Amino acid sequence: MKVNPYKIGENIFSIKISIFFLLLLLNAGCDSFVEVGQPSGQLTKETVFQDRATAEAAVTAVYSSIRDTGILSGSNLSITTKMGAYADELNFYGTSSNTTLNFYNNTLLPTNPQVNNWWKTAYNQIYAVNSIIEGISKSKVLSQSEKDQFMGESLFIRSLIHFYLMNLYGDVPYIASTDYISNNKALKQPADFLYSKIIEDLLLSYSLLQEKYLTNDRTRPNKAVAMALLSRVYLYSKHWAEASNAASYIINKSDVYKWESDLNKIFLKASSTTIWQYKPALEGQNTAEGGAMILLAGPPSDVALNPAFVDSFETGDLRKQKWIASVSKGTLSWYFAYKYKTKLMTATSVEYSIQFRLAEQYLIRAEARAYQGDLIGAKEDLNKIRLTAGLNDTNALSQQEIINAVKKERRFELFTESGHRFFDLKRNGDLDAVLTGVKFGWNSTDSLLPIPESELILNQNLLPQNPGY
């Protein structure tokens, strides 16, 4: 039976559209989005999708929300900083009032405001794209190609946010509708179910999106962006063959995604290795990551790189030379991530916040190939990364040695990029072995964040609380 992609909806979770979605659209003007007027606080689907401009404003406004707030914003309130401190990537130097402290010393509680904010913001963003999906299905004005594009983007976003929610909180509700009555009783779903729904959404997203980017700056997803997330999802869920094939899809598009051997060019806005990135709200703005990570003077007010991590680079690794810098005060020095090299405003934006890039796809394929027994192919992919870093080919020979070498390479290639270090330790079962005795107060139950207490009060079906909280 043929599936109609415009009739996707399940009665699951509870969040009102009202002010959140209305403000997304009304505030979109500062991002060159079309402003949508609505006299009441309730924004109806019929109002949003009467023409392409309003539908596009709704979709782009969600990107703006993801860029500026919540899990993936890249700011010092995002998982880049918080989960970097939660694991062993970043050290904390701020005051006791700084929200990073509880992540760093592993004293999170269900009442933690950041844990609560990530949850609520993520489900608000999911609600927004579900409203777009439902609105698209009712539009009699949008062309089929326009529906396909907006639907494909919305499914991609829904997959992306659910993926991070489950890897942070464990079993969580999968939300695919705007029915607030049944959503109010949302049940937590296990990992297998969540992964199956995420993969289902991404496959449909891939089928609907275009091969070419809508804009040259790679800020609106195309097929390759959906495939980049799909390769990561397959890797995390241990679907090795599928992960390898998804990564190969992107790697083989060498006319679009061209390898860059100059490490100083990889994080520029026009990098040929970028698959998907955020566009700043205003011309001249750069990345939240640069703003959060780059230190102009010491001591740091929040975080800096863990010196033990900096010392663990191989001799001659150009990533240490090009992607790490330091500041000093007296006899003390602090290291910081210098992938993005621009902290402040510039005449024109020079760096965009990169969410998916080519090097990760090589590392995904290397790991997936190793688990499948393709050791030669795995080493070829691994050595592609190492050569660019100025290193010799890996000495790893056995399957386990190559897998360990890939783990190590991911640590040095993907540091301070959306919590990769924590998630890699977690999915590989290495959290306790690496962090016990290294992180003060680390417990095995810290592999999951607590479900916000306020959510448990609202919805008893979210019980029980995650272990340890």
Image (cartoon, grey):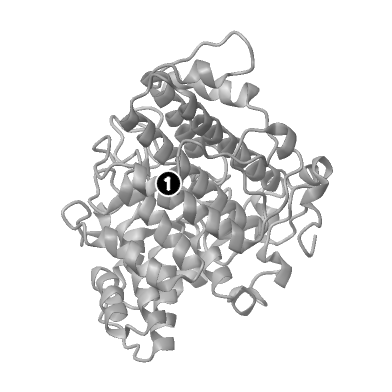
Asked whether 386 or 199 is in front, the reply is: 199
Residue 321 makes an appearance in the image? no
In this view, which residue lies farthest toward the top?
Answer: 39
The image shows a total of numbered marks equal to: 1
Which quadrant of the figure has residue 363? bottom left
Comparing 135 with 100, the one in front is: 135
Q: Residue at x 71, y 39 (%)?
A: 183
* Extreme-front residue of the structure: 1
The C terminus sits in image quarter: bottom right
In the rendered image, the vertical position of residue 146 relative to residue 402, given as above or below: above
Q: Is residue 34 above or below residue 446?
A: above
Across and down, in percent, residue 249 comes to 28, 60
Give the left or right position of residue 135, taking residue 467 as reference. Answer: left
The residue sitting at 62% across, 48% down in the picture is 174
Q: Is residue 13 visible?
A: yes
Q: In which quadrant of the rendered view does residue 142 lie? A: top left
**Amino acid found under the numbered disc labelled 1:** Lys
Q: Is residue 98 left or right of residue 27?
A: right
User: Mark 1: which secondary structure?
Assistant: loop
Q: Residue at x 54, y 59 (%)?
A: 195
Residue 420 locus on image (x, y percent)? 49, 61
- Residue 68, position as x, y percentages in the image: 50, 36
Q: Which residue is mark 1?
A: 2
